[in-house]
Image (spheres, rainbow, N blue to C red):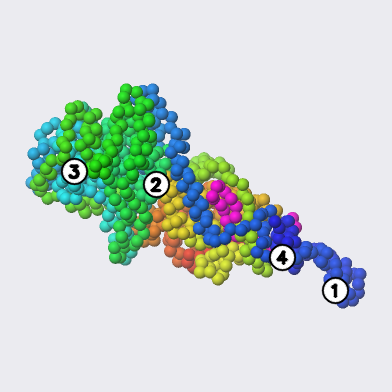
Amino acid sequence: MLLKGASAGLPGRSRADGAEPSRLVALFSFVSGMFGTTRKRIFLFGLVLPVLLPPAVSYGQTGVLPGTAELTWEGDLSARMVAGIDRFLMRRLEAAPEGRAAFWNRDFSSEADYVRSVEANRERFRKIIGVVDRRSPPRLEFVSAEGGEPLAQSDAVTVWRVRWDVLPGLKGEGLLLSPGNRTPIARVIALPDADATPQQLVGVQPGVQPEDRFALRLAESGCLVIVPVLVDRGSRFSGNPALEPARRAMTNMTHREWLYRMAYPLGRHPIGYEVQKVLALVDWLEAESSPGAGIGLAGHGEGGLIALYAAAVDTRIDACLVSGYFSARERVWQEPIYRNVWALLTEFGDAEIGSLVLPRTLVIEHSGAPRVEGPPPAAEGRRSVAAPGRIETPPAERVTSEFNRLQQWAAALPDGAGERVKLVPPDPRAGTVPAGSESAVQGLLEPLAEGVVVAAVPGVAPKRGGKGPDAVEQQRRLVRGIQGTLQDLLRVSDRLRDQRYLKRPSRESAEAFTREAARWRSTLWKEILGRIDEPMVAANPRSRLWRETAKWTAYEVVLDVWPEVFAWGLLLVPKDLQPGERRPVVVAQHGLEAVPEDTVRTDVPYFRNYRAFAARLADEGFIVFAPHNPYRGGDRFRVLQRKANPLKLSLYSFIVGQHRRILDWLKTLPWVDGRRIGFYGLSYGGKTAMRVPAVLEDYALSICSGDFNQWLWKNVTVDWPNSYMFTGEYEMPEFGLGTSFNYAEMAYLIFPRPFMVERGHRDAVGLDEWVAHEYAKVRRLYTELGLGSRTGIEWFEGEHEIHGVGAFRFLRKHLDWNRPR
């Protein structure tokens, strides 16, 4: 449907704007020569002029762009976009188990063949949970109580404090339980839930019910037991008290979320560090203990997760007991964010992780999970910035269905391996079962020691003989130890990236560098942002008239991308387009919590940031498209990231797809020059300016405003109060970014296309020094390869805002645009 009287090539041309100046001049010259008086000339000119001009255009609510259907949607299209992406992700989550078979090639011919056939899966699992660093040589030391006495003792068990090396600069600590004077029948690492201390699990301190003290039960059964301290869910150390003012740099994040946020962009994870602590103990047990005794793991709650993951990555562990954790995991997005693992559900559910334990023994105990309603409330003076998330005991059917999936692979193994996988259900009378119940511990120990008899209930707790460890200090050392390891990694990450990107011969010529960059581009798109390979649906463009000024007409446009996913924005079309003319386009991208019209209007609160730059560019004669990106709606859009990450997707998986669709559609318009489409974005739009043009080469240039930064430092450092470590933007971390890309490396992928940074001196999003350091690397690349004129940075006295001076010149120059008079 066309606007009434509109030209198929020139939408929205009015009678006053549409005639070609050359034809009008020629007509007026002809009339002047034929008739002598001015009055006669004007009279005849008035008769002939309407013949040469297109008929008047009627702008009504039904006005649409040529070649599009009428857009009839009402309401908040931003909320509609978020809801559609949410439905897309929920379908993907529900279908995830069916798609995992493509990643596996299990060989059930023999146990050895099976282990070999899943080794590639094991390696991928190690990587996504961050178990990638070489551990320190095995060393464990006893920390004596007063007078060299053990911490506690009973007739059957002696308890010692221990600590051990994990990684350079990082130690683990906990308790070691020896079975009195007996030779241990087995060696077991017992992992409490995150909110239980080793002292509580042993009974030296109150806090764990006697029937749940499975570490004590194991020691009384004749095992050597080590109980590590886990990172807890408190928030005492989640922040940096050294910053001024200190209260602004402390948060209500749990310690686990605090470490998650800084670990995730570096390709690490608090889960991985906990697993490394366990494996460091396995290293020590292998080196120091007699080879005859087997090694087992047992864990409850968060400890159950760590036990399952550790047994999956290390085949030296002979048996594993998982209590209060195992279930279908497609709702992991509802759990605390520190359980968010990139790409997990594409290849692994709990059953698949359990299949990495096979053919070894795995006991699943459906005990009560620790109940977590959310992050700690923010105490006075702390920032309330933690992500939502809860933990509750899963219903029996979810546990059973996941166990049955695991059981099918165990049953296919030879030599009765199927019997090594066991499910301990809750007691139907009590509705639950204690953590580390008699039958669960019996199942764990059977492959480790013959003839072992497990006591029905744990015995008397050991009596404390000396001063016990300070649990608060233990937690401080653990949190600060992992934090220090991550901050050290942040400091060397620059060097790691340079080793990849600054090698010769890739920098010998622009062509050589561009060829090499194609491989890096694929890494950014597939491994960091996440690529949706599902075929797109037909664009089905719809539009309606939105606004008209003397210089341009604006249309609201919607384009379909994938089922339930669409692109939406405003297209501003100058009125002085000439027949057959093709003009450059600027894609003008808004930032966080904004909508497209915020880049156009002067009567909105965001005008102070955007300065109506989309409208100003249209005033200069550019065609402008102002798209909507789905980072609006607070937790409603942030939860999309939680749902996407386990599917190896992110919010930018959708944003890249939307921009692919926008670019393809713009290039179909007869007045668009598809070779001259530039990108210009502020804030989150600046984030888009670094990511989308880096992977979509149809963008002819990119301008990053109000965001270019030492991006990794912005995410990870704890030494600057405006770091994302201290804000509520919990969706921000991108897994593994730090060892592959900072903003300079993203700009390398834009090369050799023009690239510019716009930076206000008083913009709190970063520091001038950070921006200068990162941009210098970009400038160096362009200059070394002979294209220094294609990049620039404009500093201006301002805040978080579009400046629109040097950037406008940059657009005119590199999109080859000089507005005709």
Q: CA distance from mark 1 to mark 4?
A: 27 Å
Q: CA distance from mark 3 to mark 2?
A: 30 Å
- Left of 744 or right of it: where is 36? right
The region drawn magenta spans 558-581
Mark 2: amino acid: Arg
Residue position for label 1: 42
Label 4 neighbourhood size at 10 Å, few (<14), some (14-19), many (20+)?
some
Report if residue 518 is visible in the image.
no
Q: CA distance from mark 2 to mark 1?
A: 76 Å
Q: Quadrant of the N terminus?
A: bottom right
- Main SS of the magenta part reads strand
Mark 4: amino acid: Ser
Residue 331 numbered tag: 2
Asked if disc 1 and disc 4 are in contact, CB closer than 8 Å, the reply is no
Residue position for label 3: 211
Residue position for label 4: 58
Using the rendered view, name the quadrant where residue 236 is placed.
bottom left
Mark 3: amino acid: Glu
Q: Does dot 3 land on a helix, a strand or a loop? A: helix
Asked if disc 2 and disc 1 are in contact, CB closer than 8 Å, the reply is no
Using the rendered view, name the quadrant where residue 116 is placed.
top left
Which of disc 1 and disc 2 is earlier in sequence? 1
Q: Residue at x 79, y 64 (%)?
A: 53
Label 1 neighbourhood size at 10 Å, few (<14), some (14-19), many (20+)?
some
Mark 1: amino acid: Ile
User: Which of 118 and 720 lies nearest the eye of the viewer?
Assistant: 118
